[in-house]
Image: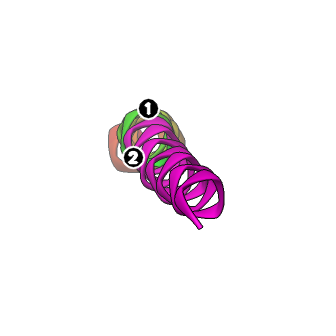
Amino acid sequence: MKRSGIFIKVFFYTIIFSAFLVGSTAVLFSSQIMSYYSGAQLQKSAPLTSN
């Protein structure tokens, strides 16, 4: 009984750590993608407004 309880705890903490890692990575990449997209939009709209 104790051994299965330890494995359940390890599995639970591994799932929590993996979710935290994936969430932080998604936040990091979403900020980079949004900044790139806004920069591309500015570059695309800049020549149109200057003409």
Q: How is the image coloured?
A: rainbow
Q: Which of 18 and 48 is in front in this view?
A: 18
- Position of residue 16 in the picture relative to residue 8 (left or right): left
User: Based on the displayed image, in which of its 4 quarters is residue 17 positioned?
Assistant: top left
Q: Residue 4 carries which label?
A: none
Q: Does the magenta stretch include residue 23?
A: yes
User: Which secondary structure is most common in the magenta stretch?
Assistant: helix
Task: Identify which amino acid the numbered label 1 is placed on.
Answer: Gln
Residue appearing at x 49%, y 36% in the figure: 25
Q: Where is residue 16 in the image (x, y as percent from the top left)?
A: 43, 54
Magenta-highlighted residues: 1-25
Q: Residue furthest bottom?
A: 1
In depth, the one of 11 and 39 nearer the eye is 11
The quarter of the picture where the N terminus appears is bottom right
Is residue 11 found inside the magenta-colored segment of the image? yes
CB under 8 Å between discs 2 and 1: no
15 versus 18 height, above or below: below
**Residue most extreme to the front:** 1
Q: Which of marks 2 and 1 is in front?
A: 2
Query: Above or below — where is 31 with respect to 12?
Result: above
Q: What element carries label 2?
A: helix
Of labels 2 and 1, earlier in sequence is 2
Residue 20: image tag: 2
Q: Which of 9 and 24 is in front in this view?
A: 9
Q: Position of residue 51 (x, y in %)?
A: 44, 42
Q: Label 2: how many residues lie within 10 Å, few (<14), some (14-19) or many (20+)?
A: few
Report which residue position mark 1 lands on: 32
Task: Say which amino acid is labelled 2.
Answer: Phe
Q: Is residue 37 visible?
A: no
What residue is shown at x 47% (from left), y 38% (from top)? 21
